[in-house]
Image (cartoon, rainbow, N blue to C red):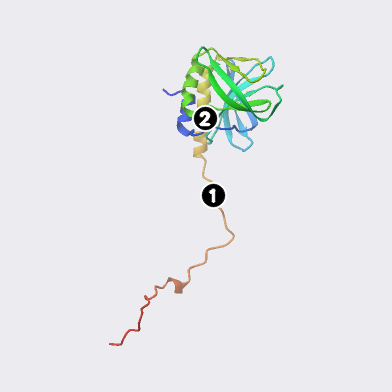
């Protein structure tokens, strides 16, 4: 059986990149240390996501997918960060006792964003579901490692997958927008143009 992350990637993903900025977010499900949310990006498209926030200093990690798009994006955020625009930042994720994931992200202001290759997502999801914690380390800076609890990770992965499936189906059933309108009518064809013309000849014909 494919997991929620695997199902998302198998259907639409070919490349991974930046994430949509969120105009509105609504949390609709909570389990363990994780919330499931949905919202609308600044481009008007629907977004599904899951995230976990540390209540001590409000640092958070999230995963989100734009419906109709082709990217899954990871985001780490902390209110006290002040990262110069487009700063390359290394990230190391270790899920349980599994081998570390070495990532390369981009920092802007209060957040760092990065992505995983398509073929790596099934492995990530399996580790995410079966482990009890995840450590996020930023080796190029002085930010202490984050320990993120994964209690509720199986349930939140399932909810994430259902959100993507439901909103994708809703998008596919929406009627197509009408074609462009014009302020003029189509003129009927000229009758003379419609009559076939005799083929041209290199000499005049003789009378019988």
Marker count (numbered) = 2
Q: Measured from the top left, where is residue 158 in percent x and y? A: 50, 22
Which residue corresponds to mark 2? 164
The 10 Å Cα crowd at callout 1, few under 14, some 14 to 19, many 20 or more, is: few
Q: Earlier in the sequence, mark 2 or mark 1?
A: 2
* SS at circle 1: loop
Q: Are marks 2 and 1 in contact (CB under 8 Å)?
A: no
* SS at circle 2: helix
Image height check: is 192 above or below 24? below
Which residue corresponds to mark 1? 178
Q: Along the line of sight, which residue is nearer the eye, 188 or 74? A: 74
Residue 153 shows which numbered tag?
none
Residue ID at (53%, 25%): 160
Q: Along the line of sight, which residue is nearer the eye, 62 or 176? A: 62
Q: Measured from the top left, where is residue 51 in percent x and y? A: 59, 22
Q: Measured from the top left, where is residue 48 in percent x and y? A: 56, 29
Q: Nearer the viewer, mark 2 or mark 1?
A: 2
- Can you name the residue that lies furthest to the front here? 140
Residue 47 shows up from this direction: yes
Which image quadrant for residue 141? top right
In which quadrant is the C terminus drawn?
bottom left
Q: Measured from the top left, where is residue 97 in percent x and y? A: 51, 12
Q: Along the line of sight, which residue is nearer the eye, 159 or 114? A: 114
In which quadrant is the N terminus drawn?
top left
Mark 2 to mark 1 CA distance (whole Å): 26 Å
């Amino acid at each position: 059986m494919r997991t929620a992350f695997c199902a998302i990637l198998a259907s639409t993903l070919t490349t991974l990149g930046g994430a949509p900025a969120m105009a509105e977010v609504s949390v609709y499900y909570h389990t363990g240390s994780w919330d499931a949310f949905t919202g609308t990006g600044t481009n008007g498209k629907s977004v599904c996501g899951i995230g976990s926030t540390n209540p001590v200093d409000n640092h958070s990690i999230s995963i989100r997918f734009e419906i109709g798009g082709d990217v899954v994006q990871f985001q780490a955020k902390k209110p006290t960060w002040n990262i110069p625009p487009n700063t390359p930042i290394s990230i190391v994720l270790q899920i349980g006792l599994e081998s570390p994931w070495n990532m390369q992200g981009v920092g802007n202001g209060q957040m760092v964003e990065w992505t995983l290759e398509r073929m790596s997502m099934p492995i990530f999801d399996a580790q995410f579901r079966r482990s009890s914690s995840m450590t996020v380390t930023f080796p190029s800076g002085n930010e202490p490692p984050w320990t993120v609890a994964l209690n509720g990770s199986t349930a939140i992965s399932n909810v994430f997958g259902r959100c993507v499936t439901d909103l994708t189906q809703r998008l596919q059933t929406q009627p197509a927008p009408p074609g462009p309108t014009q302020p003029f009518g189509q003129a009927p064809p000229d009758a003379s143009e419609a009559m076939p013309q005799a083929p041209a000849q290199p000499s005049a014909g003789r009378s019988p």
